[in-house]
C-alpha cells in the first residue's frame, strides 16, 4: 500500500513545453513582472491539462490516506502559479520545488525530503509519476518506484523519452486514468519476470529497447531491438537504495552458478514464446538458443535452456514446434569477459564481433524462427552480433530476449 505519491509537474500534470523561458526566469526570482508574464502565457492556452482537477480529486477520494504531492525542478514561484491555475482550491500535501533542495532531479533528494516530511518508513510505499528519463533516474536514485505516463509525449519522441524506456520504469501507462490501478496493484504493471516473481496477475510485459552498434566501430543508424523481461540494478552508489530491495537483481545474483533456475524464469520464457511467435496457420517452428558461455566458464544459460526444453516436453506450447539448441553459437578462444576485464562500450562490441560465431551453420534454416536468450543486457553487443551472424547464416525471423536490462549509474 502506497503512503506517498509524488507527481512531476511540467509535461506530466500540465503541458508546459512552451513556458521554458519564463520558467527559467523565475528561478530564485519572484519578480511580479515575470509572474505576470507567466499568468498571461498560461491563460493563452486553456488546453494544458494532462491531469485535470477531477482526476486528482478522484485519486484523493479513492486513496484518502495517501499523501499527494508535486516534485519539480521548476522554481517555487512558477510552480505555485501553475498549480493554482490548474487546480484551484486543491490542497497538495507537499510541493518540492527547485529552491527546496540542494540537488534537484536527477537526484532523489526532493523525494527524500517528502518522505521525511511524512515519516514514511519504506521506499516500497513511495511512487513518483513522471514523463521522462530525469524522473526515472530521480526515483531510482531515491530508491522508490516510478511510473512513466506517456500520455503527454509528442508524436516525435525526444532523447528524454527514449531514455525513460531504456531504464525500464516500474510501470508504463498511457493516460491518467491508469494511475489509480497502478496505486491499487503496482506489481501487475511490472516487466514480466518481475511480475511473476511478485506473484501478480496481469498481462505479460516485455519492453522492446533499440540498441545500436557504435559508429566508432562501424555502426550506423540501424536499430537492433532487444526485448527485456526485467531489470538488474548494478552495484553503483547512485542506485544502491533501489538495488537493495529489488527481487530480480537478488535472484540473478543468487543464480550466477546455478544448474536449476527459478520456475518464474522458465515461465517468462514460455510467455515470450507464446506472445512473440504466434501460430496463426498451422505449426510454428521455433529454435531457441543462447549467448554461449566463455571458455572455462560454467554453461549457465545452456543449463537454463535444458530446463526450458524439459518444461516444453512436460507441457508443450500449443501449435509450436520448439527445439532448444544450446550450442548453436560459440566463442572463439581469446574472448574476454565483458565485466571482469572491465571493457568499455566500444571494446565490448569489438570483443563480441571478433569472437562470436555460428558453430553449426548447417542447422540454420530460413523457414524457422529463432529466439536468442541472454541473462543481463548492458550494451546489447552479444545479442546484436548473435542476430547478425544468424541472419548471415540464413535465419529468417530472429528475436532477442534478455532476462534483465542492466541499470547503471543514474548520476
Image (tube, rainbow, N blue to C red):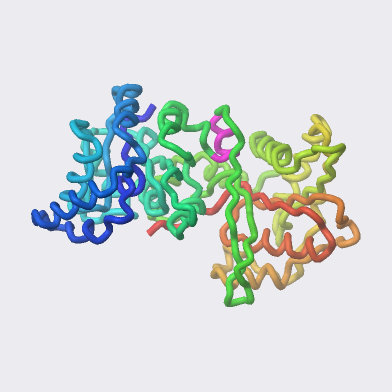
Question: What residue is shown at x 26% (from left), y 37% (from top)?
Answer: 69
Report the predominant secondary structure element of the magenta stretch.
helix
Report the front residue among 307 and 393: 393
Relative horizontal placement of residue 4, taking residue 132 as reference (left or right): left
Quarter assignment of residue 6: top left
Q: Which residues are magenta?
A: 191-199
Question: What residue is shown at x 18% (from left), y 45% (from top)?
Answer: 81
Is residue 259 among the parts visible in the rendering?
yes
Is residue 407 among the parts visible in the rendering?
no
Q: Is residue 31 above or below residue 69?
A: below
Picture coordinates of residue 278, whole percent (x, y): 76, 39
Report the front residue among 407 and 48: 48
Judge whether residue 198 is colored magenta.
Answer: yes
Q: On the rendered image, what quadrant is the N terminus found in?
A: top left
Question: What residue is shown at x 82% (from left), y 58% (from top)?
Answer: 395
Relative horizontal placement of residue 280, taking residue 342 as reference (left or right): right
Report the front residue among 241 and 91: 91
Picture coordinates of residue 152, whole percent (x, y): 41, 46
Relative horizontal placement of residue 177, taking residue 91 as reference (left or right): right
Q: Is residue 157 above or below residue 323?
A: below
Amino acid at each position: 500500500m502506497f503512503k506517498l505519491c509524488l507527481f512531476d509537474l511540467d509535461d506530466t500534470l500540465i503541458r508546459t513545453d512552451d513556458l521554458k523561458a519564463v520558467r527559467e526566469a523565475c528561478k530564485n526570482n519572484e519578480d511580479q513582472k515575470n509572474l505576470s508574464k507567466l499568468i498571461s502565457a498560461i491563460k493563452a492556452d486553456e488546453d494544458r491539462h494532462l491531469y485535470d482537477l477531477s482526476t486528482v480529486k478522484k485519486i484523493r477520494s479513492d486513496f484518502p490516506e495517501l499523501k499527494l504531492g508535486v516534485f519539480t525542478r521548476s522554481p517555487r514561484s512558477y510552480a505555485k502559479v501553475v498549480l493554482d491555475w490548474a487546480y484551484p482550491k486543491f490542497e497538495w500535501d507537499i510541493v518540492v520545488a527547485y529552491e527546496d533542495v540542494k540537488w534537484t532531479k536527477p537526484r532523489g533528494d526532493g523525494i527524500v525530503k517528502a518522505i521525511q516530511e511524512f515519516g514514511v518508513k519504506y521506499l516500497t510505499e513511495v511512487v513518483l509519476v513522471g514523463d521522462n528519463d530525469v524522473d526515472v533516474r530521480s526515483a531510482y536514485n531515491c530508491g522508490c518506484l516510478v511510473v512513466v505516463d506517456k500520455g503527454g509525449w509528442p508524436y516525435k519522441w525526444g532523447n528524454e523519452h527514449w531514455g525513460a524506456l531504456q531504464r525500464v520504469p516500474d510501470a508504463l501507462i498511457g493516460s491518467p486514468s491508469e494511475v489509480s490501478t497502478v496505486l491499487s496493484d503496482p506489481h501487475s504493471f511490472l516487466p514480466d519476470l518481475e511480475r511473476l516473481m511478485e506473484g501478480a496477475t496481469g498481462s505479460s510485459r516485455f519492453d522492446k529497447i533499440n540498441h545500436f552498434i557504435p559508429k566508432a566501430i562501424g555502426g550506423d543508424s540501424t536499430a537492433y531491438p532487444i526485448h527485456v523481461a526485467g531489470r538488474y540494478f548494478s552495484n553503483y552508489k547512485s542506485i544502491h537504495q533501489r538495488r537493495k530491495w529489488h527481487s530480480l537483481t537478488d535472484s540473478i545474483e543468487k543464480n550466477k552458478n546455478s544448474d536449476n533456475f527459478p520456475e518464474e524464469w522458465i515461465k517468462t520464457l514460455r510467455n515470450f514464446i507464446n506472445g512473440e511467435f504466434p501460430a496463426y496457420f498451422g505449426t510454428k517452428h521455433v529454435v531457441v538458443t543462447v549467448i554461449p558461455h566463455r571458455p572455462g566458464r560454467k554453461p549457465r544459460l545452456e543449463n537454463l535452456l535444458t530446463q526450458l526444453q524439459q518444461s516444453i516436453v512436460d507441457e508443450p506450447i500449443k501449435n509450436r514446434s520448439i527445439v532448444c539448441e544450446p550450442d548453436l553459437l560459440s566463442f572463439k578462444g581469446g574472448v574476454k569477459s565483458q565485466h571482469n576485464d572491465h571493457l568499455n562500450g566500444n571494446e565490448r562490441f569489438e570483443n563480441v564481433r571478433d569472437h562470436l560465431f555460428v558453430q553449426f551453420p548447417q542447422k540454420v534454416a530460413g523457414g524457422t524462427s529463432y529466439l536468442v536468450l541472454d541473462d543481463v543486457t548492458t550494451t546489447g553487443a552479444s545479442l546484436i552480433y548473435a542476430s547478425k551472424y544468424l541472419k548471415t547464416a540464413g535465419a529468417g525471423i530472429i528475436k532477442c530476449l534478455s532476462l534483465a536490462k542492466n541499470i547503471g549509474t543514474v548520476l
